[in-house]
């Protein structure tokens, strides 16, 4: 069987070793495999510059004979590479794997990664994705799509409310995203006034039912906290309650006078 070139996805290839060295073989023994991953991700090295990998087609699966290069391509998220499919009998490593059922099942496990012998970076967070085209084409880098929501350049324009205008003749169009809900504000205001009235009534009732000593203690505490006397608290609270209650009453226009 002759050597056949094939374009494959590195994720479909299987390792034939359960441990690999942290450095390449000669004459690249000074290069570490994790540095090669970073070089690919940064665009300093093209995938086509690496020596073509050899794989063996056995039982419908492709087994790699160059495990360090396969580790680099998988870590760098390379999508496509060109490999040489060699005959099964030309390399004793694949035969050793097939004769060891325990090792074979370990290598066939989903998500398997061989152990790296030596100090090596294991996790990478690339900001770019590699798009490899076989043969001698140039290396291309595809930027990630932004994860944020695109905001339109122009916002909808509605007429500014008359209560905000300078006079009855001058009107300005203001870009806003929504109109204020006046009914909601009115409802919230009525709720607030109701709560104030109830709180005031409960406070007055508590003062009336309390003993002289307790009433004196409560009044002194309020006076010291607010820097006012009891005689100042009651009139001010009454005026404020009446004013808020008056604001909630409907406005009736005066009768027409000829």
Image: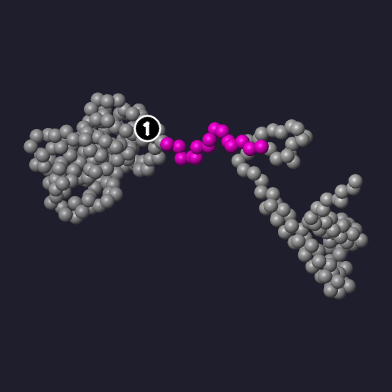
Residue 22, visible in the rendered structure: no
Going 22% across and 33% down the picture, which residue do you hit?
A: 82
Going 29% across and 37% down the picture, which residue do you hit?
A: 79
Which sits in the foreground, 46 or 142? 142
Which sits in the foreground, 116 or 238? 238
Q: Is residue 24 above or below residue 248?
A: above
* Label 1 Cα crowd, 10 Å radius (few <14 / some 14-19 / many 20+): few
Is residue 86 highlighted in magenta?
no
As drawn, is 124 to the left or to the right of 152? left
Going 74% across and 36% down the picture, which residue do you hit?
A: 165
Residue bearing mark 1 = 142
Residue 171: x and y in percent read: 71, 33
Q: If the image is split into quadrants, where does the N terminus sit?
A: top left
Going 53% across and 35% down the picture, which residue do you hit?
A: 152
Residue 202: x and y in percent read: 79, 68
Q: Residue furthest front?
A: 258
Magenta-highlighted residues: 145-159
Q: Residue furthest left?
A: 1
Q: Is the stretch drawn in magenta largely helix, strand or loop?
A: loop
Rendered image quadrant of residue 3: top left
Instruction: Describe the element under mark 1 as helix, strand or loop.
Output: strand
As drawn, is 173 to the left or to the right of 67? right
Q: Is residue 10 above or below residue 230?
A: above
As drawn, is 110 to the left or to the right of 257? left
Q: Is residue 238 above or below residue 139?
A: below
Rendered image quadrant of residue 68: top left
């Amino acid at each position: 069987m002759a050597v056949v070139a094939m374009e494959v996805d590195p994720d479909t290839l299987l390792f034939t070793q359960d441990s690999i060295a942290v450095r390449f073989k000669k004459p690249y023994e000074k290069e570490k495999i994790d540095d090669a991953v970073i070089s690919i991700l940064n665009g300093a090295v093209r995938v086509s510059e690496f020596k073509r990998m050899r794989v063996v087609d056995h039982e419908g699966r492709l087994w790699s004979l160059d495990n360090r290069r396969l580790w680099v391509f998988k870590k760098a998220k390379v999508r496509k590479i060109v490999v040489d499919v060699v005959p099964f009998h030309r390399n004793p490593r694949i035969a050793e794997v097939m004769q060891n059922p325990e090792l074979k099942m370990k290598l066939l496990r989903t998500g398997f990664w061989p152990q790296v012998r030596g100090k090596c970076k294991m996790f990478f967070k690339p900001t770019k994705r590699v798009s490899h085209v076989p043969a001698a084409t140039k290396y291309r880098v595809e930027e990630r799509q932004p994860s944020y929501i695109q905001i339109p350049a122009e916002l909808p324009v509605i007429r500014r409310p008359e209560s905000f205008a300078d006079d009855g003749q001058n009107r300005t169009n203001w870009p806003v995203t929504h109109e204020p809900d006046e009914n909601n504000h009115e409802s919230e205001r009525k709720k607030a006034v109701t709560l104030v009235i109830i709180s005031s009534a409960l406070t007055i009732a508590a003062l009336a039912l309390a003993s002289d000593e307790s009433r004196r203690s409560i009044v002194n505490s309020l006076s010291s906290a607010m820097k006012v006397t009891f005689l100042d608290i009651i009139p001010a609270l009454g005026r404020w309650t009446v004013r808020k209650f008056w604001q909630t009453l409907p406005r009736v226009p005066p009768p027409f006078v000829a």
